[in-house]
């Protein structure tokens, strides 16, 4: 592997980690948000 | 809930074991990560046959390389003591005369250090190569981009 | 809930712009290093990553102390969130450092003080996250976690001084060093861009991660009140 191969590997890994974390975070946010919305709808119906 | 607790204990155990291992190897190795050539010369009888590291500067005009046998020999110095090193195989690109190096291996009874691994040590200084033409052109390019980059 | 606040979007956008500029400067514009050649360009991602990780763990350190004092779960939410992001940046530092080490030192890894203490830092906060994730008693976990986070932070000043106290393969710091940076001025600009970019990216991640923690707290609250009602 040449000099640029190592540079590409380092930057590539960093990019994958950061984008991967962002996607993971957004996925958890969507899941938690939807779960909470459903729960609130449900309990709202029950109290009314 | 029992399964959850087991998972918890297992994960905690792994982390604690990893930490303990690193601290143990850290105390063992990191404190004296390498000996200087003069330290090694002083206590060579005590450390004979033990695997250890020596770090120093590669003595100018001391590197001998035989591509047939892959035998690489050189001297490491710290200004006071000098150690003769024999190594089978290649060395990193940054390994050169006048540069820093750390070698792993053992001190032999024949009076040289048998290296199994060479690591090049470089300084914390980073600067462009001293080619005035390309440097100037890069600087010009640099300035032009800075100007355009500002809103 | 989906897209995040205006603040988050501005932080994310600014981080993206700065990082794109820093990437271009560091990979294309700036000359290679005199000794190492092009592979030295890994510095522009390696060094800003570890500084960002240090900042993230400093946030954990401060919010953990404040949590033990005020017992406000909002502080704890910031601590957990920041720790998670700090682990990501420490992971990037370790990975890029190994990739930089192989072509320059000749080895991917060695157990010198700097590398060992960075691996310990990573392990401490991975352990912290495991403690928080698997805990059955959230309040107790928050308390123990805070203590672990505060003690774990001590690794960072130790790691900074390690290269001066002990012999290491790793070179001393290039930026935060007595006598000023030992990096040529042309190389400082992409470094500064990526610093700013990663710190803003950290801020963006933190805002979003804390929002996730708030949604989780709210969910737990709704479940609790519903459970009480029967």
Image: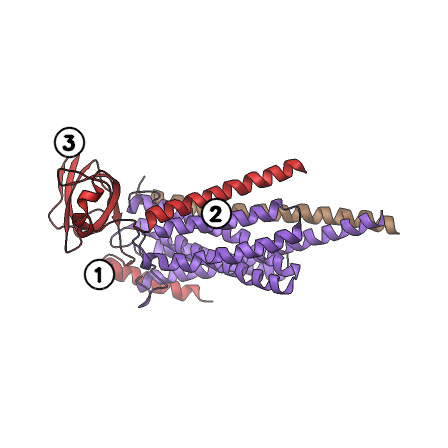
In the picture, one chain is purple; tell me its letter: C
In the picture, one chain is brown; tell me its letter: A
Q: Nearer the viewer, mark 2 or mark 3?
A: 2
Q: Nearer the viewer, mark 1 or mark 2?
A: 2
Mark 3 and mark 1 lie on one chain; the one further toward the N terminus is 3
Q: Residue furthest right?
A: A48
Q: Residues within 10 Å of mark 2 (few under 14, many from 20)?
A: many
Q: Residue sitting at 59 percent across and 38 percent down?
A: B7
Q: Residue sitting at 53 percent across and 55 percent down?
A: C149
Q: Residue furthest left?
A: B61
Q: Residue furthest top?
A: B68
Q: Determine which residue is flagged by label 1.
A: B132
Residue C59 percent coordinates (x, y) = 53, 61
Measure the C-alpha gap from mark 2 to mark 3: 43 Å
Q: In the rendered image of this protein, which colour is used for chain B?
A: red
Q: Is residue C42 visible?
A: no
The part of the image, by quadrant, that contains residue C99 is top left
Residue C126 percent coordinates (x, y) = 52, 47
Q: Nearer the viewer, mark 3 or mark 1?
A: 3
What secondary structure is found at the residue carrying circle 2? helix
Q: Determine which residue is flagged by label 3.
A: B69
Q: Determine which residue is flagged by label 2.
A: C123
Kindly indicate whether the residues beneath marks 2 and 3 are on one polypeptide chain: no
Q: Residues within 10 Å of mark 1 (few under 14, many from 20)?
A: few
Q: Is residue C26 visible?
A: yes
Q: Residue sitting at 30 percent across and 59 percent down?
A: B138
Residue A25 numbered mark, or none: none
């Amino acid at each position: 592997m040449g000099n640029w191969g190592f540079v590409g590997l380092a930057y590539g890994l960093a990019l994958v980690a950061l984008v991967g974390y962002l996607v993971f975070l957004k996925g958890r946010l969507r899941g938690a948000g939807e779960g909470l919305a459903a729960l609130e709808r449900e309990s709202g119906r029950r109290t009314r | 809930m029992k399964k959850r607790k087991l998972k918890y204990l297992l994960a905690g155990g792994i982390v604690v074991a990893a930490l303990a291992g690193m601290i143990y190897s850290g105390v063992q190795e990191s404190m004296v990560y390498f000996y200087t050539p003069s330290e090694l010369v002083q206590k060579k009888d005590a450390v004979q046959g033990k695997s250890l590291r020596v770090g120093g500067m590669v003595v100018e005009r001391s590197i001998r390389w035989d591509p047939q046998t892959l035998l690489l020999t050189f001297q490491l110095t710290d200004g006071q003591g000098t150690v003769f090193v024999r190594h089978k195989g290649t060395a990193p690109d940054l390994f050169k005369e006048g540069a820093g190096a750390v070698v792993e291996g053992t001190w032999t009874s024949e009076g040289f250090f048998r290296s199994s691994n060479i690591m090049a040590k470089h300084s914390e200084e980073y600067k462009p190569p001293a080619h005035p033409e390309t440097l100037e052109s890069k600087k010009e390019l640099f300035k032009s981009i800075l100007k355009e980059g500002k809103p | 809930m989906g897209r995040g606040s205006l603040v988050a979007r501005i932080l994310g956008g600014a981080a993206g712009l700065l990082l794109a500029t820093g990437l271009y400067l560091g990979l294309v514009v700036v000359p290679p290093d005199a000794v190492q050649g092009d592979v030295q360009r890994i510095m522009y991602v390696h060094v800003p990553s570890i500084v960002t990780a240090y900042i993230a763990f400093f946030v954990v350190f401060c919010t953990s102390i404040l949590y033990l004092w005020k017992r406000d779960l909002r502080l704890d939410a910031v601590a957990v969130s920041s720790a998670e992001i700090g682990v990501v940046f420490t992971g990037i530092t370790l990975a890029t450092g190994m990739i930089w080490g192989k072509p320059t030192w000749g080895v991917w890894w060695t157990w010198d003080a700097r590398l060992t203490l960075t691996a310990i830092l990573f392990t401490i906060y991975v352990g912290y996250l495991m403690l928080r994730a698997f805990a059955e008693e959230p309040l107790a976990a928050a308390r123990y976690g805070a203590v672990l986070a505060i003690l774990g932070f001590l690794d960072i000043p130790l790691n900074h001084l390690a290269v001066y106290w002990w012999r290491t393969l790793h070179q001393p710091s290039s930026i935060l060093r007595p006598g000023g940076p030992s990096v040529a001025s042309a190389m400082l600009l992409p470094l500064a861009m990526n610093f700013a970019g990663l710190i803003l990216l950290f801020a963006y991640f933190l805002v979003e991660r804390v929002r996730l923690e708030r949604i989780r707290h709210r969910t737990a609250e709704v479940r609790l009140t519903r459970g009480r009602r029967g």
